[in-house]
Image (cartoon, helix red, strand yellow):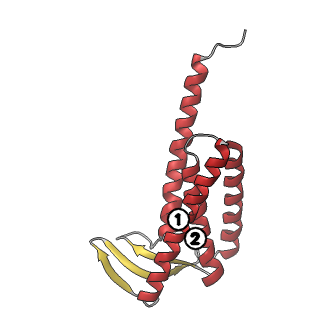
């Protein structure tokens, strides 16, 4: 039952990331011409740009490599989660990572590139999906480490082999 709840939670996070990401992309592409830039907040510009690479403009013009890498990463993440779904809070980063991947795959299928719309000084343009992937990786490492520490503490308190 615990694993089912984790899958449901991960699915809800995935859906939320995709809806927010695609919603902003739809809004930006309707409000700005491709290549246009507007001030949004101090130090944050709104842009309408395309990225054929991965997060933050890496691996530009490597569509086949990006497609294979994304597919392998998603498959590995699903296998890892399937084997560890009952671990506390793992559903959150998994949902963020999968939501980010799905959000960007939708763009690749529809546009042939990912729509980026947020620009910080001295930083490549990015989108909600990229941010979800980045934060999801950090949260995944934290959750895995905290779970490992909890297991080590539990093992330290348990009697050893006879």
Quadrant of the image for the N terminus?
Answer: top right
Q: Is residue 76 above or below residue 126?
A: above
Of helix, strand and loop, which one carries label 1?
A: helix
Q: Residue 154: x, y in percent?
A: 58, 23
Residue depicted at x 55% and y 44%:
89
**Do the CB atoms of the residues marked 1 and 2 lie less than 8 Å apart?**
yes
Outermost residue, front direction?
Answer: 1
Residue depicted at x 58% and y 53%:
9
Determine which of the numbered discs, if any, sits on residue 152 in the image: none
Quick one: label 1, few (<14), some, or many (20+) residues within 10 Å? many
Of helix, strand and loop, which one carries label 2?
A: helix
Q: Going by the image, does 76 lie left or right of 46?
A: right
Figure quadrant of residue 144: top right
Q: Residue 37: x, y in percent?
A: 37, 84
Figure quadrant of residue 86: top right
Q: Is residue 159 above or below residue 24?
A: above
Outermost residue, left direction?
Answer: 42
Q: Is residue 61 visible?
A: no
The residue to which callout 1 is attached is 17
The residue to which callout 2 is attached is 103
């Amino acid at each position: 039952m615990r694993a089912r709840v984790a899958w449901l939670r991960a699915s809800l996070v995935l859906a939320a990331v995709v809806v927010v990401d695609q919603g902003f992309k739809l809004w930006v592409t309707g409000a700005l011409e491709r290549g246009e830039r507007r001030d949004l907040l101090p130090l944050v510009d709104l842009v309408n740009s395309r990225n054929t690479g991965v997060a933050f403009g890496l691996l530009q013009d490597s569509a086949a490599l990006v497609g294979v890498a994304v597919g392998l990463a998603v498959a590995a993440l699903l296998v890892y989660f399937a084997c560890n779904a009952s671990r506390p809070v793992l559903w959150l980063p998994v949902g963020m990572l999968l939501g980010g991947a799905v959000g960007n795959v939708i763009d690749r299928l529809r546009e042939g590139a990912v729509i980026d719309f947020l620009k910080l000084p001295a930083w490549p343009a990015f989108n909600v999906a990229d941010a979800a992937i980045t934060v999801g990786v950090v949260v995944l490492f934290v959750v895995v480490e905290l779970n490992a520490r909890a297991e080590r503490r539990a093992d330290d308190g348990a009697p050893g082999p006879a």
